[in-house]
Amino acid sequence: MAQVNMKLVKELRDRTQAGLGDCRSAIVESEGDLDKAVEIILKKGLAKSVKRAGTVAAEGVVAARVAEDKKSAVAVEVNIQTDFAARNKDYLAFVENVLDIASSAADGADLLALPFPGGEGTLEDVRAALVGVLGENITVRRWQRLTVKTGRVSAYVHMGGKIAVLMAAECDSDATGDKMDAYLQDAAMQVAAMAPLYLSAENIPEPDRKAQSEIFAGQLREEGKIPEVRWPQVIEGKLGKWAKEICLLQSMSVIETKKSMDEMRAEAASSAGGEAQLLPFVRLERGEGIETPQGDDFAAEVAAMSK
């Protein structure tokens, strides 16, 4: 039997969020094989599936699918508790079914209430059953669709399902849209990497713009180097630079570093022989905004067990 060390126990606990005693027992039972120990924890978790239904699920994947006519696309986020379970084939098949349902659902629909493809019951029924099989909570957290009337929609999934981006161009013709695909893919990759907040400076909400102006005014007041009469002009210049940091079209292309993404858009549309305007993008990042509990201090748990 493999000797148990607390480093191995801690690693198993980090991966599974199981109790310290359960992790220690699993390490003993698996004779020090961490992957087998994870499987043991998951299998023993079957009886706890009801309790785990309320556990935070922040791992998993985001996924995207473009319609055959390339006029629309959907992106979904389906979370699960551990990265180990996120590689399970049944979980990944469930994600594909969520995409199936989202692709045909009405905008804003509750996917969990819709019928499951090719079977009885709803998506929620299948989700609950899969929680019982895997012993981990699963959440269909959010989904979005992007649609054009004339043009092209493109999708990009980054880092094996960590980030999904949908980009769309409304064009003067579908022929123009077909030739915009390369630009849309480049733009989607830039959105994934740089995480801009808005498509263009025109999309910045006025309260946000006003709040940023007040920040710049406070900085100028603190510096005390520029007469207040010149502040409006200076602040406007600073807002322009700020827009380049948070807006896709105003940002510089990572491919053509001397051109903005808006200039690249105009060149791509011109090369396609038509006109193309981008729609606000969709960007979903796995676990974004989810607060995961840190749990008790590991050393404190060990000390408690020793007592």
Image (tube, rainbow, N blue to C red):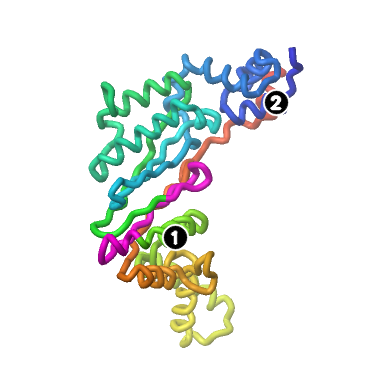
Quarter of the C terminus within the rendering: top right
| Observer able to see residue 201 | no
Is 265 covered by the magenta stretch? no
Taking the spot 35% from the left edge, 32% from the top edge, the residue there is 97
Residue ID at (69%, 29%): 299
The answer to which quarter of the image holds residue 23 is top right
Picture quadrant where residue 31 is located: top right
Q: Which sits in the foreground, 280 or 288?
A: 280
Seen from the viewer's position, the closer of residues 209 and 252 is: 252
Describe residue 242's horizontal placement relative to residue 180 as left or right: right
In the rendered structure, which segment of residues is drawn in magenta?
156-178
The residue under label 2 is: 8
Residue 19's label in the rendered image is none
Amino acid on which disc 1 is placed: Ala
Residue 187: mark:
1
Picture coordinates of residue 160, whole percent (x, y): 51, 42
Label total for image: 2
Q: Residue 88 or 240: which is nearer the viewer?
A: 88
Point 39% across, 63% down: residue: 199
Q: Residue at x 53, y 45 (%)?
A: 159
Rendering coords of residue 213 (x, y %): 44, 72
Q: Is residue 158 above or below residue 181?
A: above
Q: How far from the left and from the top, in percent, is residue 138? A: 42, 30
Q: Nearer the viewer, residue 48 or 39?
A: 39
> Quadrant location of the N terminus?
top right
Tag 2, which secondary structure? Answer: helix
**Can the viewer see residue 153?**
yes
* 33 left or right of 272 in image: right
Separation (CA) of disc 1 from disc 2: 43 Å
